[in-house]
Each structure stands twice: as C-alpha cells, then as structure tokens.
Image (cartoon, rainbow, N blue to C red):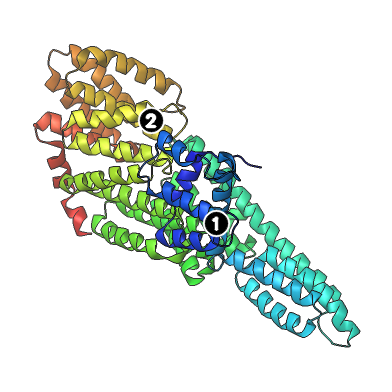
Amino acid sequence: MILVSIQELYDLVKSLSKSEKRFFKLTAGSEAHSALVVKFFDELEQLESFDESKLQKIVKPKNKQLSEKELIKLTYDVILKSQRTFFAESIPCHVIKDEISNLRNLYDKAQYKQCRKMLNKLKEDAYAEESFNFILEIISVEKQLLDVENKFGLNNNSTDDLINEEQTLIKKAKNMGEYAQMFSQLNYLVRQNMVVKSPKEFEPYDKLLNSPLLKNKDKCFSKKSLVIYHHCRALCYSKKRDNTTRQIEFREMAALMDKHPFLISEFPKRYLSAINNILSVEIEQANYATAEKLIDGFMKLKTHPAFNTTDLQLKIFTSTSNAQLLIYTDGGKSEKVLPIIKYINAQIEVFKGKINKEELLIFYYNFANLYIYSQDFEEAGKYVNIILNENDKVLRQDIQCFSRIQNIIVHYELKKYPQLSYILKTARDFYKEQKFLFKTEKLILDLFEELPTAKNPEEVWKKAHKELTAILKDPYEKTANYYFDFMAYLESKTTNKKIGEIIFKKQIQSWKR
C-alpha cells in the first residue's frame, strides 16, 4: 500500500475544479464511511493555505473504525476513483478500453452477432485514430470470434488475413517507437547544450537530419510518426538557428494535427510546442503585431477539451505569459509589462509547487531584463539573485550564463564596486566550465574588469560599443543579443539615453508587422 501524507492529500483536494469536487461527492456517496470522507474532504477544502497544525487537528480520528492514516488513504483513493470516472468519457484511451471490455463480455455471453457488429465499428474507429495497440487487442478477440463464426458457416476474414494484419500493425507501432526514441535522444542532446555557439556544435544536428528516419517522409508509416518526424526536424533547425525552416516544420506539424484532431488529443504537448515555437519565431524576428495576434489565439486553447488538465493549462499560461513579457520588453513597451509581472507572480503563488523550475527561471530572467531596461536595478537584482541561488547548475545553462552578466550590470549600476571584482571572478570561473563562450560574453566581462580602473570610462564604453557592432555581424553572436540587448545597453552609456527609449525607437517598425 502506498502511504499518503496529509499534505499530498491537501494538494490533491486543492487541485480539483468545482465540477470535479461535485463529482467526488457523488462518487463518495457509494463508498464505505461516505459521510466521514465527505466531511473530512470539506474541512480540507475550506483551508485557504497549507497549515500543518490545523490539518493535524482535522485529521484526528472521526470515529473508532478508522485510524488517521486510513482516513487519509481512503479519501485519497476515492478522489482518484472519482477522477477516473469523471474523465472516462473524455479521454479516448479510456473509452476504447471500456469498449474492448464490452466486446469480451458480448463474446462470453455468446452474443456473436452483436459482438461482430460492435467489433467492426470499434476497429474502424481505432484505425481512424491509429490506435495500433488497441487494434491488436481487438484482433485477439476477433480471432476467437472468427473461430466461432467458421463453425456456424459464416464467411469472414481468414486467420491468415488477421495474422498479416497484425504484422502490418506491429510494423507501424515499431516505426512510431523508433521516431519516439529518436525524439528522446534529440531532446536529451538539446538539454545538454541549450545554445549553439559555434559551427562545430551544429554537427550532431546535421547528422540527425541526414539520418534515414529524418531525411524525408518516406520512412513514416503513420500520421503519428509524421508528427514526431516534423517535431524532430523542427528542433534540429531550431538549434541550427534556421528560423525559416523551423517555422515551416512546425507549421506543417500544426496543420497536420489540425486536419486530424485525434492527433491533438494524442499529442497535446506536441501541439502546444508547435504553436509556441511558431509564436517564438515571430518574436525572434521582431514581428510583434503578428505575435500579439498569435498570443490571443494561443490563449483560446484554454477552453479546448484536449487541454483541460492542470499540466496543460499551466503550459498555456507559462508560454503565453513569457511571450507577452518578451514582446513588450524587447519591443520597448515596458509600461505594458508591469501588470503582466503582477499577474504572473500571483499565478505562481496559486500554482505553487506545480510550475517547474525551468519555467520559473525563464520568468525571473525576463523579469530581470525588464527591470534593467527600465533602469530599476534594485528590483532587477532581486530576480537575478533568485536565479543565481538555483542549486542545479545544469538546468538552463544558457539562462544561468546570461544571468551572471545581468548580475555584473546590476552591481555596476548600483555602484557596488567592492563586490564587483568578486562577482567577475566567480563569473569567469563559471564560464570556464562551459564548452564555448560567446565573443559578446567575453567582451562584457573584459569591459567591466577594465572600467573600475579606467581614467576615461566614456572612452571605454565607446570602444566596447564599436567592438560589439563588429562582433554582431557574426550570425552566431546575434543569439547573445537576443538574450539581452547588449547593443542598446552600450548605446545608452555612450549617448546618456534611457535603455527603454533606445529599444522602443529601434523597434517602432516591429509593431507594424
């Protein structure tokens, strides 16, 4: 028996929607100790926040029949049972499992005609949604049914036909597994190296793109395999910074799924990834008007039945919120960002413990950028510190690298010069562990090491601005300026203009496309 803590039960209760809570009470009504379980559930639900002392008082035995642990476990199990039933008719795999059970029941009751009628329809539907594993289960029933039908003198498929059909299905299922395995390998490679900084780092992605599975569509034996095929190719082109082909691949992937809605139900996260990447390309290309429209469409997916789980609702929230942060921060409309930051921080509290560390790091990094561009360096420093205090040094190394640059800028602007030399040293040590260093990153480190002792700081800023202008002609280096607008920052130092004003003036045309 799996032990369940009072906090785990409390978190599960709080994750339920109003309709799910109502359904729980209907389910609990048919269970043992129903009145006790419902009363306990209501008491947990009424607590606004987790308070162990209050919870311990609530969980004290309500009668002599159940211990504290038994009451917690029983309530937890009834909630999970109600969830299974609540979503049974909306999740295709649950529906088809029930139908296969019905098939077996009809066969056991010798209702062979009804069994055949149901089997043919179920098989047709399963083929339409490429449910290969379920079709194999249906065929196992069909073999038994076929044996009976032959004895009645009915002419249907032969056993050889079913065996050939099984082999074809196994081939398609195996093909999909091969693509899924390739995606896992690619995803691991991406995680190992979030930002490509040199041509040599393109080599693994070129190798994958030239592999038999990804070279063309010929090796895809199903629509599901084709979805993963496009996803793999799109990720490779994303790492290669080829936004044109990346956009094409993700658009084809989304169009395929739109045309065949069962693919959205089967792969909801892949669909959200496609939409998010299509949006990201528009943001990276500074097509802010287009990006705003895409964000509005993205938000509407909240009401789509395929995305009604907490996990997927969170993905929509984090993706659209970060997109808004980026277009308004990078587009120079900082006044629009502050309400979004307030909303995001409120949602982080609502979903505390459910938003993963990576999403939080992205939020805090974008917050810090906004406050640096707005020249509120104290506020920027709060979020930079949160990122730097992250113990997992492997997670989003790209953000952890650039947050160290943010930290240097914040300390310099706040005139915390005594700490600056130590921060520069720790940043250098951190960068030593990285395989490659952007020329831009090296320039900024060198710049701030030179500034404290410079007799003429203004000349140092001008020299750095000139060097960066030359560096950014390198397409690989433009990636660094996407993470932080170093050019606008250096320009503000040489012209005494505000960073936000420089960015907005530079991006005026971007709000027209």
Other residues around mark 2 within 10 Å, as few (<14) / some (14–19) / many (≥20)? many
Q: Amino acid at mark 2?
A: Gln
- Taking 35 as reference, is 440 above or below it? above
Q: Is 147 displayed left or right of 263 in the figure?
A: right
Q: Is 86 displayed left or right of 138 in the figure?
A: left
Q: Residue at x 26, y 47 (%)?
A: 343
Other residues around mark 1 within 10 Å, as few (<14) / some (14–19) / many (≥20)? some
Query: The N terminus lies in which quarter of the figure?
Result: top right
Q: Secondary structure at mark 1?
A: helix
Q: Is 340 displayed left or right of 498 in the figure?
A: right
Which picture quadrant has residue 219? bottom right
Q: Residue at x 53, y 44 (%)?
A: 187
Write down the residue under mark 2.
400
Q: Nearer the viewer, residue 103 or 464?
A: 103
Q: Residue at x 42, y 48 (%)?
A: 43
Q: Nearer the viewer, residue 166 or 108?
A: 108
Q: Amino acid at mark 1?
A: Ser
x then y, percent, for residue 384: 30, 29
Res 267 visible: yes
x then y, percent, for residue 18: 40, 59
x then y, percent, for residue 227: 54, 60
Which picture quadrant has residue 467? top left
> Looking at the image, is mark 2 or mark 1 nearer the viewer?
1
Write down the residue under mark 1.
34
Q: Secondary structure at mark 2?
A: helix
Residue sticking out furthest to the front: 64
Res 204 visible: no
Query: The C terminus lies in which quarter of the figure?
Result: bottom left
Residue sticking out furthest to the right: 151
